[in-house]
Amino acid sequence: MSRERLDGLVSWRAARALAGAVHRATAGALFEADPELRAALRAAATEVMTAIAEGYEQRTCGEFERRLAAAAGAAARLDSLICLAGDMGLLTRESPPRLRRRVTETAELVDALRQVVTRYQRLQAMPAPPRVN
């Protein structure tokens, strides 16, 4: 896959930026007390990005839509984990709202792309109109 083609997906670029933000936010010493939560946060953030890339590479609408659904699920999991990390005091006070906004924005982009892929898939399945001579 050409990196430039993947970079053309706004949802993937947003997911990549989100993953970086989560990795930076969980790099602090506070997470030494709960390395499992840090790992779960990072895994969920990375899954959003990689699910989009994997689906894109499959080159079929059905598989792409399935992987975008997985990315949306990972975003929901990430949002919940951010809430938990905030509740436990492992993130700075400003981090949870900021990170959750980024999750929401990324999830909305993933959903918009999923809708486009689904519509395209339906159009491909429609019979061609009859030819008129």
Image (cartoon, grey):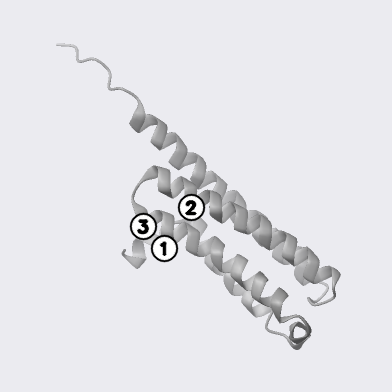
Q: Horizontal placement of 116 versus 26: left or right?
A: left
Mark 3 to mark 2 CA distance (whole Å): 10 Å
Identify residue type, mark 1.
Asp
Q: Horizontal placement of 78 versus 49: left or right?
A: right
Q: Position of residue 122 (x, y in %)?
A: 41, 31
**N-term mark: 3 or 2:** 3
Residue farthest toward the left in the current orientation of the protein: 133
Give the residue number, with chain letter if any, for mark 3.
57
Instruction: Name the secondary structure under disc 3.
Output: helix
Residue farthest toward the front in the current orientation of the protein: 36
Identify residue type, mark 3.
Glu
At x 85% / y 75%, what residue is drawn?
89
Residue 112 higher or lower than 107, as above or below = above
Identify residue type, mark 2.
Arg
At x 24% / y 15%, what residue is drawn?
130
Residue 95 higher or lower than 51, as above or below = below
Give the residue number, with chain letter if any, for mark 1.
7
Give the residue number, with chain letter if any, for mark 2.
67
Neighbor class of circle 2 (other Cα within 10 Å; few <14, some 14-19, many 20+) is many
- Tag nearer the camera, 1 or 2: 2
Location of the N terminus (image quadrant): bottom left
